[in-house]
Image (cartoon, rainbow, N blue to C red):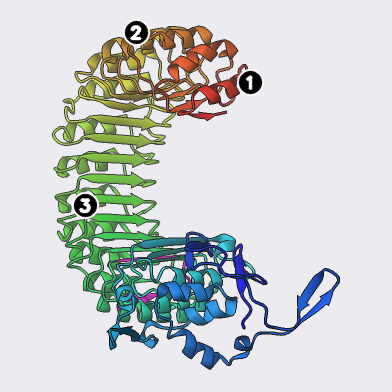
Amino acid sequence: MLDFYWVSGDDEFYSGGSCYPNPGRLLSIGSQVDVYYPASKRARISAPFAFEGSFFEQVARSSIEVLPDECLFEILRRLQGGKERSSCACVSKKWLMSISSIRRTEMPSKLENEVVSSGDVEMIDSDEDQELKSDGYLTRCVEGKKATDTRLAAIAVGTSSRGGLGKLLIRGSNTIRGVTDLGLSTIARGCPSLKALSLWNVPSVGDEGLYEIAKGCPLLEKLDLCQCPSITNRGLIAIAENCPNLTALSVESCSKIGNEGLQAVGRFCPKLQSVSLRECPLVGDHGVSSLLSSTSSVLSKVKLQALNITDFSIAVIGHYGKAITNLTLTGLQNVSEKGFWVMGNAQGLQKLVSLTITSCRGTTDASLEAMGKGCTNLKQMCLRKCCFVSDNGLVAFAKVAASLESLQLEECNRVTQAGIAGALSNCSTKLKSLTIVKCMGIKDITSGVSMPSPCRSLRSLSIRDCPGFGSVSLAMVGSLCPQLQHVDLSGLYGITDAGFLPVLESCEEELVSVNLSGCLNLTDEVVVALAKFHGGTLESLNLDGCRKITDASLAAIADDCLLLSDLDLSKCAISDSGISALSCAKQINLQVLSLSGCSEVTNKSLSCLKKLGETLVGLNLQHCNSISSKTVELLVESLWRCDILT
């Protein structure tokens, strides 16, 4: 008779007791991993024991445990189905690893059982055929100390009869018993339906593990490798040669993957639609250009960041990127103005819809205009830290980018107030969204800026953290955008009521969302006007840090803002009187209310907060020092549907 083992915690197997304690239950071996075991029976003891007092100790091993690995393999590979394999995997770690090492091709495709019925012998099939047809809809994720070979083995065994593993994510690795090629091999053998594999920070996994995945998981469609220093071109070539359905590839900070691996992907993966390459020192022009030219008919999303590529690769994108719709280029220090200019003039990016360029010195006024001309269907343009783009380039781009709907500028410090006005004027037909973030070149200018025609298509305006953007600039931009519905002016501490009131007055459409967080100099006058002119449509209002906002604003909001669902009053100068006025509103339907840092709101607001809480799903009371813990407890007890932050 054999010893039984039971599983506890992550990977530890303990002797003593039956592995079948309860009928028909699922035993967890790791995160989201379920291994089936059948009904319990009383443990039977057949080995000799030494007794000492009231304790006894088993001194002999069961005969089946001394079987050679070859014999155990032959026994286990003939198990009838997934439930039986899961049950046997619970016996011991040795059995688990033995079962997980069995390839599907090494299992009998059809197990024959003799069933006596009316004197005849019938042949019945096991559920093995059903398992081989599994769709692979299960997802498993192992992280940190839970990422071990034993856990992967349990996943491989436990998911085989439950629809099959379709997506596996390994984040980090156990520092003592981390994931190695052995663990990945168990997945390869037991999960042929795997379609997506993500490996992050697994230094012990190398080419052998990836080779096993390539051989055992031919349906693989998505591969994500990040910080895998042991994986080289050899592993990526194996994936390319054996996984023709690969549609998405992401390689980040893999120091040994270079041009040869990318060439193989381009040659053997005709369905590749998305590629992301970041901080891989061995990747150069030869690999990127080969990959792009080989997959030019289907490749639609490309992201290149911090690579040692030159103008040649960028020119290849412009020539062969006929199917590219989304393109992101970041930190390409060896690409000059010529490369971007050629990319635009090559006329190959006709389907490009979204273009993001960050920290690329080759992005200048001339190259920006060329990209505007060549990308005729470009709708979204984002420029970050492009220090050589000035007003001239921005205005020229706006003139030729006829399909542009969204423009975002971040840390483009040569762009001034005149450039913004010119861009708005020249994008007057289709531009719907303008975002300006941390552009230090924008400063209030009282003269020298002509007032061009308004941009009547703009619906969303976001100007954030631009210290030089004051009331004069805001009034000018407001007059150019009469159809605004969404306004975000967070971090503009220089604007005053005199700058924001013209924006409210010039709006022909009624505002839906307004973010004024960090606008220190705005007063109740702005909120009263906002409630008066736009209270019928306003749904979201953020006044975080507006320290001059008082109870008068809450009274106006209570009277006029009928649809307001999200209100942030953090660090405002409101008190219990304002909360009382807000709670007395007849039609207000707040769902999220933030009072963080409102020190003048006290325990007296308990009943008013309870009344507001009838509709609230979120309430922030952090740093409300005048509200006691007892009051918070009463609120938590009363507002059981509402998430309360304290």
Q: Which residue is mark 3?
A: 371
Q: Which residues are magenta?
A: 248-264
Give coordinates of residue 572: x percent, y percent.
Answer: 50, 17
Q: Nearer the viewer, residue 268 or 608?
A: 608
Give coordinates of residue 96: x percent, y percent.
Answer: 53, 76
Q: Earlier in the sequence, mark 1 or mark 2?
A: 2
Q: Which residue is mark 1?
A: 630
Q: Secondary structure at mark 1?
A: helix
The answer to whether one can see residue 445 in this image is no
Question: Tags 2 and 3 in contact by the CB under 8 Å rule?
Answer: no
Q: Nearer the viewer, residue 438 or 4?
A: 4
Looking at the rendered image, the disc whose residue lies closer to the viewer, 2 or 3, is 2
The circle drawn on residue 559 is 2
Q: Residue at 48% x, 82% y: name it.
A: 101
For label 3, count other residues whose C-alpha is less than 10 Å away and answer few (under 14), some (14-19) or many (20+): many
* Image position of 420 with respect to 360: above or below: above
Mark 1 and mark 2: span between their CA atoms? 31 Å
